[in-house]
Amino acid sequence: MDALARLVIIFSSVLFIVPISIAVDTITVNQPIRYGETIISAGGSFELGFYTPENSKNQYLGIWYKKVTPRTVVWVANGDFPLTDSLGVLKVTDQGTLVILNGTNSIIWSSNASRSAQNPTAQLLESGNLVLKNGNDDDPENFLWQSFDHPCSTLLPNMKLGRNKSTGQEWYLSSSKSTDDPSKGNLTYRLDPHGYPQLLKRNGLILTFCSGPWNGLRFSGFRALAGKSIYKHVFTFNEKEMYYTYELLDSSVVSRLVLNSNGDVQRLTWTDVTGWTEYSTMPMDDCDGYAFCGVHGFCNINQVPKCGCLDGFQPNFPNNWEMGVWSNGCFRSRPLDCQRGEWFKKYSGVKLPDTRNSTYIEA
Ligand SMILES: *[C@@H]1O[C@H](CO)[C@@H](O)[C@H](O)[C@H]1NC(C)=O
Ligand SMILES: *[C@@H]1O[C@H](CO)[C@@H](O)[C@H](O)[C@H]1NC(C)=O
Ligand SMILES: *[C@@H]1O[C@H](CO)[C@@H](O)[C@H](O)[C@H]1NC(C)=O
Ligand SMILES: *[C@@H]1O[C@H](CO)[C@@H](O)[C@H](O)[C@H]1NC(C)=O
Ligand SMILES: *[C@@H]1O[C@H](CO)[C@@H](O)[C@H](O)[C@H]1NC(C)=O
C-alpha cells in the first residue's frame, strides 16, 4: 500500500469517526443544553433534550427513545413547571444539582441533590437513566442523583417500584394528565408496604386495582408468563428494601410499562415494522377492578352474572344484586359450624385477596 493510499484511509476514517464522537451522552458544568440541543446515550437508545408535546405550546425537558417515531417520552423533568418559550437551559451546577432555567434565569426546576459534589457531570445512560455523578465516578452507590429515582408514568426495564427503607426513598408511577400534558394526573401505581406488599393503583384516594401478593413468580393477580416470555418479574423484599422490577431476557427488545392517563397499566413492545404493540394490559377485565363484587363476593368473568357470593354467604342487597349492582357484597347467611368440619375452604384459580391486614413470617 503506498503512502498516499494509506493517508487517504487514515483521513477518511477520521472523517467517519469524528461525527460519531460528537454525539455526546454527558453534560458538564460548562456545557449546558438549550432547545434544539440533545445528548444521546452511548449506544444510541435514548435522547435527552427540550421538546414540545403535540397540541401544546409548552416546553419540557424529557428523555425519549432515539429510534422510535412518533417521539415516545419516558421521563419528564419539569412536567408540572412548563417553559413557555424556547429560552430554557438545562445546567449542571458546581454544587452538583441539575437545574432548568427560564429565559430570565429563574430556576423553574431543580434536582435538589444534597451530597457535596466534585466536578459534577450528568450522563444519559443506555438504560434511559439520567445520572448526576462526580467526574467519572460510575459507581451507582455514589450517584448524586438519578432520574430512575424519580419515575413519571413509565417504568423502563430495571427501574424500581417500591421503597428503600434505609433512605425512605419511594419509587412509584404517577400518570400524566394526558398525552399532550405531562403534568401529574390523579393516578398512582405503587407498592404498598402494609401487611404483605402488593402493587396498588389508585385514582386520587380511591383504590381501583390490587395486584395481590407476590407468589414467588409474580404477583398473584398477574397472568402467568408463558414459556417464551421477553422479560421476567423480579421482587426484592428484605428489611432494607422492597421493590418490584422487571428484566428483559433479550436486551435488544424495546419494551416499557406505562401507567396511562386512562388508568391502564400497559406493557408495550416496539419494532420498526409494527411500531408499539400491546403486550399486556391491566386491569384485564371487570373482575380486576378492586372489590368489584364487594365484600365476601367473588368474580368470574366467564360466568353470567360475573359476581357471586362465597359459600355460606348471600347478597347484602338482593334486589340490587339481581340488577347487577354488586359493590355492596355479601353477608354470612348461616353461622360457621366448625362441628360440621367447616374450617377452611379451597378456591382455586383466583387472585388472592387484599393482604394489607395480613401478617407474615419472614423465612
Ligand atoms: C421566569 O420565571 C420567573 C419566576 O417564575 C418569572 O417571573 C419570569 O417571568 C419567567 N421568565 C420567562 C421569560 O418566562
Ligand atoms: C426541590 O425542592 C423544592 C423546594 O423544597 C421543591 O418544591 C421541588 O419540588 C423539589 N424538586 C424535585 C425535583 O424534587
Ligand atoms: C438503599 O439505600 C442504601 C443506603 O443509601 C443503599 O446502599 C442501597 O443501595 C439502596 N438500595 C436500593 C435498592 O437502591
Ligand atoms: C383529578 O382530581 C381532581 C381533584 O379531585 C378533579 O377535579 C379532576 O377532575 C380529576 N381528573 C381526572 C382526569 O379524573
Ligand atoms: C383492615 O382492618 C381494619 C380494622 O379492622 C378495617 O377497617 C379495614 O377495612 C381492613 N382493610 C382491609 C383491606 O381488609
Image: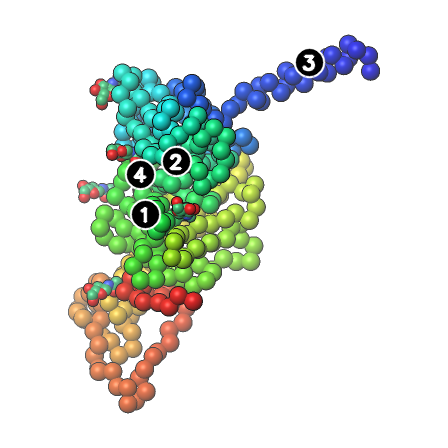
Which residue is under mark 4? 176
The C terminus sits in image quarter: bottom left
Tag 4 or tag 1, which sits nearer the N-term? 1
Depth check, front residue: 265 or 28:
28
Residue sitting at x 40%, y 72%? 348
Residue sitting at x 30%, y 66%? 358
Q: How was this image coloured? A: rainbow
The N terminus sits in image quarter: top right
Circle 2: is it few (<14), some (14-19), or many (20+) Cα within 10 Å?
A: many
Q: Which mark is residue 14?
A: none
Depth check, front residue: 140 or 279:
140
Q: Nearer the viewer, mark 4 or mark 3?
A: 3
Can you say whether 320 is above or below 172 in the image? below
Tag 3 or tag 4, which sits nearer the N-term? 3
Residue 54 appears anywhere in the view: no
Q: What separation in Å lies between label 1 and label 2 (alpha carbons)? A: 15 Å
Residue sitting at x 34%, y 46%? 167
Q: What separation in Å lies between label 4 and label 3 (alpha carbons)? A: 49 Å
Q: What separation in Å lies between label 2 and label 4 (alpha carbons)? A: 22 Å
Which residue is under mark 1? 168
Q: What separation in Å lies between label 1 and label 4 (alpha carbons)? A: 24 Å
Question: Do the numbered discs 1 and 2 sit on residues whose CB atoms are within 8 Å?
Answer: no
Q: What separation in Å lies between label 3 and label 1 (alpha carbons)? A: 55 Å
Circle 3: is it few (<14), some (14-19), or many (20+) Cα within 10 Å?
A: few
Tag 2 or tag 3, which sits nearer the N-term? 3
* Percent coordinates x, y for residue 304 in the rendering: 32, 67
Q: Quadrant of residue 131?
A: top left
